[in-house]
Image (tube, rainbow, N blue to C red):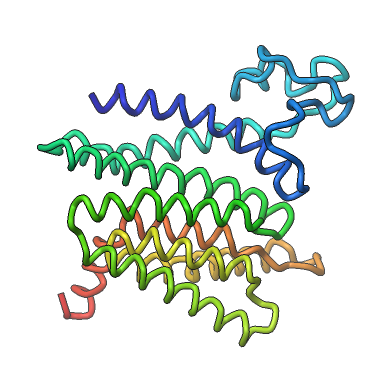
Amino acid sequence: MMPLLATVVGVTGLSIGSFLNVVVWRVPRGVSIVRPASACPGCGAEIRARDNVPVLSWLLLGRRCRECRTAISARYPLVEAVTAIAFVVVALVFAPSILEATDPSSVVAASLVLAAYLALAAISIALSAIDLELRRLPNPIVLTGFIAGVALLVPALLIETRYDLLVSAGLGAAASFAFYLALALIGRGGMGMGDVKLAGVLGLYLGALGWAPLVVGVAAAFAVGAVAGVITLIVRRSVKDRSLPFGPWMFLGAWVGIFGGDAIAAGYLRFVGLG
């Protein structure tokens, strides 16, 4: 059952990834994600359905527009492939709870949780791509992540009567937002308000899994960001602007907390003699 589910989720991820490419290009520029139809930025020719198959079309077209031969950025198939892989990984982690559920209400709750973290995966990829390119975290996408979290996780936790996780989710969102806001105010420009808003969203998703994922997820973002910063300083010695957007590292840290927060926290406590 799991191989079939992973295949279905992976194919769905490819399609979602294709849509995310539209989001990444249009949302920061204030263009509708519905109209007009996707077109080549070089010649304006509308992209045909046969040329819009995720990853495969890019390869078959030789990485160029069919009409004008303008080069097509590798970002497009990369976003599609990464989304598919991310969806499969999320499904492998959260889908077993659906298969192991013993009553209809538990199936519904587990399905809502899976949908929530699939949504977070899609939002992680879209916002990371935008932040790396434009140093921005657009409010519409951040807000979408928050709405998806509330709409999917809150009912799931209520169904399972996990009021403790409802509390940690709410406090996680508020505490993460407050913590990043303090950093933004103290740092005077070192942390943007987009990062602050995103912190609240990630705090919700992390807190819905418990306190350990929340603490590990927040801490991991700074650890990963510090490593990335050091590497950037080494690689970009001759570049004047060696700053990095922090959004991608916030997401990476959050996923460390989601996938390994409990194990990492338990290992740390054993290491310091408290476990």
Name the residue rendered at 15%, 38% in the picture. Answer: 101
Q: How many marks?
A: 0
Question: Which residue occupies 24% across, 55% down?
Answer: 158
Name the residue furthest bottom.
186
Q: Residue furthest top?
A: 50
Regarding residue 149, the answer to whether it shows in the image is yes
Which x, y percent locates residue 230?
60, 69
Q: Is residue 264 visible?
A: no
Quadrant of the drawing holding the C terminus: bottom left
Give coordinates of residue 6: x percent, y percent. 34, 28
In this picture, residue 151 sits left or right of residue 185 = left
Corner quadrant of residue 187: bottom right
> In the displayed structure, would residue 191 be above or below residue 70?
below
- Between 74 and 36, the one lying in front of the other is 36
Where's residue 78, x and y in %? 60, 35
Foreground: 264 or 18?
18
> Which corner quadrant holds the N terminus?
top left
Q: Nearer the viewer, residue 184 or 80?
A: 184
Q: Residue at x 30, y 69 (%)?
A: 168
In the image, what residue occupies the spot 36% across and 68% down? Answer: 170
Q: Quick check: 229 above or below 126?
A: below
Question: Residue 17 at x, y = what percent?
Answer: 56, 34
